Image (spheres, helix red, strand yellow):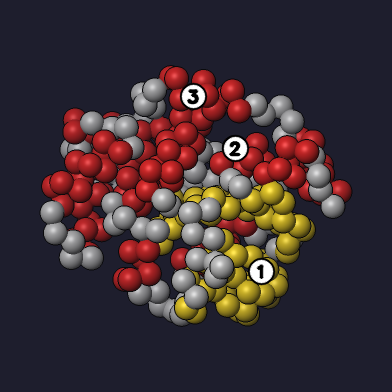
Amino acid sequence: MTPLLEARDLCVTFRGSAGSVAAVRDLSFGVRKGESFGIVGESGSGKSTVLRAICGIAPVSGGSLRLGGEALFLPRTGAFYRRVQMVFQDPYASLHPRHTVDRVLSEPLAIHGIAGPEERIAKSLVDVGLGPEFRFRYPHQLSGGQRQRVAIAAALILEPEVLLLDEPTSALDASIQAEVLNLLDGLRMSRGLTFILVSHDLAVVSHMCERLLVMRDGREVEQLSRADLAQGRAASDYAANLIKASRGFRRETAARGRRIGATA
């Protein structure tokens, strides 16, 4: 089966007056339709840069990216952004402080000329666990968890196939992280979405993803399945140490978050 999203020998190099930095080097992976695929590694490993390369906001210096079997070129088209959307790490920075939730959600619809904005906005708020009373609030009137729910709603309002998630809960309090992860997991199942989730936290990825790619210094270390994680199987010392460090995670933690509800 042809992957929905595929990287082949991907390289990303940042060039400046002080020289060049190879952030991603010869990276290859494929993500199937409906799959949740994780990318893990320590800070500076290049994992977030991979997502930015997919979106067209990081300089690809070698290799290729393909969506639905077709090569991606710069600039990315409107059709691409209707199929692929991204949720960034910091909900405090990803929302304009002077824009209401209504404007945040209506702008993508206006840009893409999509009719029926009232219905879509109302549905998107319900889908992320927020009611109509949030529609005309400003970001400073929302909690961190509520802001990230709005960012998720904004990413989903175009009804994309693929959601790129760049550390979507790392800026949130630990008590709220499980709620947002369970929200994302439920949305993927109900909508048939494909996820690429970047995290430094292997516990988060093991809860959300069927497969994962371990990165270090811009390169692949190895690829693992959820079963590999459960059994502690890893070919590399680096991945084995990541698994050991994540042993404190329990799926019951996510279940507790589900019981708390959508108050975040």
Q: Which residue is mark 3?
A: 257
Q: Are marks 2 and 1 in contact (CB under 8 Å)?
A: no
Residue at 59% from the left image edge and 37% from the top image edge: 207
Residue at 63% from the left image edge and 80% from the top image edge: 62
Q: Quadrant of the C terminus?
A: top left
Q: Residues within 10 Å of mark 2 (few under 14, many from 20)?
A: some
Q: Residues within 10 Å of mark 1 (few under 14, many from 20)?
A: some
Which amino acid, mark 3? Gly
Which amino acid, mark 1? Ser
Which amino acid, mark 2? His
Q: Is residue 132 above or below residue 28?
A: above
Q: Nearer the viewer, residue 24 or 205?
A: 205
Q: Is residue 126 above or below residue 40?
A: above
Q: Position of residue 186 (x, y in %)?
A: 43, 38
163 left or right of 201 in image: left
Residue 146 visible, this angle: yes
Q: Position of residue 223 (x, y in %)?
A: 72, 56
| Dot placed on the residue nearer the N-terminal end, 2 or 1 | 1
248 left or right of 124 in image: right
230 left or right of 89 in image: right
Q: Position of residue 38 (x, y in %)?
A: 60, 51
Using the image, tell me which numbered label, if any, was put on residue 28: 1
Residue at 68% from the left image edge and 68% from the top image edge: 27
On the image, which quarter does residue 143 sit in?
top left
Q: Is residue 5 above or below residue 192?
A: below
Alpha carbon distance from label 2 to label 1: 23 Å
Q: Residues within 10 Å of mark 3 (few under 14, many from 20)?
A: many
Alpha carbon distance from label 3 to label 1: 34 Å
Q: Which secondary structure lies at badge 2?
A: helix
Q: Which residue is mark 2?
A: 207
Looking at the image, the residue that sits furthest to the front is 1
Alpha carbon distance from label 3 to label 2: 13 Å
